[in-house]
Amino acid sequence: MLLSMPTLKYFVSEGAPRLYSVHKPVTTIGKALGNDVAVTGAGVLDHHAQIVFDGRDFVLEECERDGEIAINGKKKRRARLVHGDRLQLGAVEIGFSMFAEAPTVQERLPAGADGEERPAPPQGSSELAGVRKLFAFSEKLINRRNVDELLEAMLDDVIELTHADKGFLLLLEGAEAAADTAVRGVALAAPTAGGDRKLAVRASRNVRKEAITDAAGGISDSIVRQVIASGRPVIVSDALADTQFGRSDSVIAMKLSSVMCAPLLSQGQIIGALYVGNDKIKHLFDRAQLDLLSIFASQASLILQNAMLLNALRADKAKLVAELHDKKFGEIIGACPSMLEVFRKLQKVAATDISVLITGETGTGKELIARELHRRSPREGGPFITINCGAIPENLIESELFGHVKGAFTGAIASRPGKFQIADKGTLFLDEIGELPLNLQVKLLRALQERVVFRVGDSKPEKVDIRIVAATNRNLEEEIRTGNFREDLYYRLNVVNLWLPPLRERGDDVLIIAKVLLSKYADELGSAVRGFSPAALAAIKKYSWPGNIRQLENRIKKALVLCDQALLAVEDLDLGPGTETAVMPLEKAKEEFQRRYVLEALERNNGNRTQTARDLGVDPRTIFRYLEKEQNPMPSGAGGVARDPTEA
């Protein structure tokens, strides 16, 4: 017979399974005899695991790290249990059921004359029907997605079980604002510790399984106020004869016969109430029906809590989509002033065929900018070819760029085109151009000037029609001064410079980028994570992100794979207190502001130091001193490699 006590079924090696009721807040499982459930088998520790009831869920968690736990074949250290779960502790298998399949020891009667224990007599059919309805409703929770349908189905079940005429689900204001559909009905006053808050009807049903038109007109506000104020369920078997509520205006006006009301809780806070009533004296409610209503109220609380979380995430996603509409430039996200300046330049230069040099720290999205240049150019229909100049061995890079003919070198068993030929009629993106060897820089310069290339081992010229976009995280002007990069090649590549700011200087852009990356990779990786906790968002914004967007992307991927919660926390992103940027002294902060302001002015003037000094009202030497401190300064747009004016 099914009862309402959760049960563990221990499958022993011989004989029938042993049944244990889970009736304590903490139920221990292990090899030691002092455990609530003592089991023996290979791999079972003395204190292997425990089941904790938190008032709503039964949670299985490890007691010792060496103890292996699997739920339905998947290894776990902590997990919420649901009906039908199979637990594996070492070599021992245990089944979990939300219902008892036999009377527990406490429910058996004393032994009879024959010395055998006699089971307790069957409980009432109404309780059994209630348990079955609850089990059926739990299955509906899994299969149905619409919250309104779930609440209406639950009210129909409650009305049927309690023989009520009508049922209502009421929500306090604030809770109802988080629901995904508009709250229906007329508001009722409900005093709380925080002052008067309104209650409104979220769902209503009658005995014919129809919605009630004038929902608020059938509710006793005095009874509801009592439940909200006390946080305890209330039953009024005969309302008109009740000493407490019989003189209530609402009870007298509606001529109520019998009423039950139970609170709805979320995270220990009252969010509303479940209310049923009837007008028939022959169907007066009793205490058993109130217990049943309280159980269904806990289920309704769970539905609403999940619905509120889901709606908060949907609202956040809708807000993100709206923000992206204003803050997205093609596939690039950004709304800070420095990125808007990049977009402005990109828009203008994309339609031309001039060369573009993209600079910035590693991980700032240089390839995305290059692709957007290609996508907005007349060459969009042609190929976009990328070559990483720092990832190819020096003895192979010429062949990769220009191709080779059969027999040109050992292993050249067939002729092969290079990236220049493949990119014909399109765009060639030279990533990490600062890594290119000097001897190849000469040949690259010739190819850019004459638009003609020669394959390795061949003297026949091949014309190419390409646009060159290059990128580097190095300071090419410093490389020129040290003799590692050709000045003439630099000017050929740096017709227009696009400098990408680091993520730490982009303000709220980092939050929008993080949310977009989470949404993208949560779907790709099949993760149940749907957002960030408020603390995680604050930590993301505070962190300096030395690896920029690439580092943020990798952190989010890792967190999505390892996190078991709906929201990513600070710990999931490895952004503990020690990772926050320290508060700098005021003088240093002023210096940092001036540095960024000078760089922004340089960017607006396309790297022209003389014009920048004129705009800022300072000596050109001041601009040079700031640039000397930069690892990757803004390239000059004034012609020539920048030198200290005192050296002239």
Image: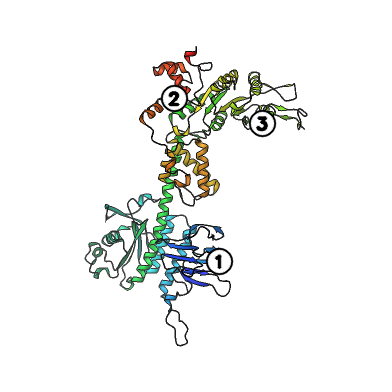
How packed is label 1: few (under 14 Cα within 10 Å), some, or many (20 or more)? some
Closer to the camera in the image, 375 or 370: 370
Closer to the camera in the image, 165 or 157: 157
Q: Nearer the viewer, mark 2 or mark 1?
A: 1
Amino acid, disc 2: Glu
- Mark 2 and mark 1 lie on one chain; the one further toward the N terminus is 1
Label 2: which residue? 600
Amino acid, disc 1: Val
Label 1: which residue? 92
- Mark 3 and mark 1 lie on one chain; the one further toward the N terminus is 1
Is there CB contact under 8 Å for labels 3 and 1?
no
Which residue is situated farthest in the bottom direction here?
113
| Label 3 SS | loop
Label number found at residue 393: 3
The percent coordinates of residue 481 (x first, y second) are 55, 19
Residue 531 appearing in the image? no
User: Compared with residue 291, is residue 143 higher up or lower down, i.e. above or below?
Assistant: above
**Which colour scheme appears in the figure?**
rainbow
- Mark 3 and mark 2 lie on one chain; the one further toward the N terminus is 3
Q: How many marks?
A: 3
Question: How far apart in space, not on screen, are marks 3 and 2 (Cα)?
Answer: 37 Å
Closer to the camera in the image, 203 or 474: 474
Question: How far apart in space, not on screen, are marks 3 and 1 (Cα)?
Answer: 56 Å
The percent coordinates of residue 284 (x first, y second) are 32, 71
The percent coordinates of residue 520 (x first, y second) are 52, 43
Q: Is residue 29 left or right of residue 158?
A: right
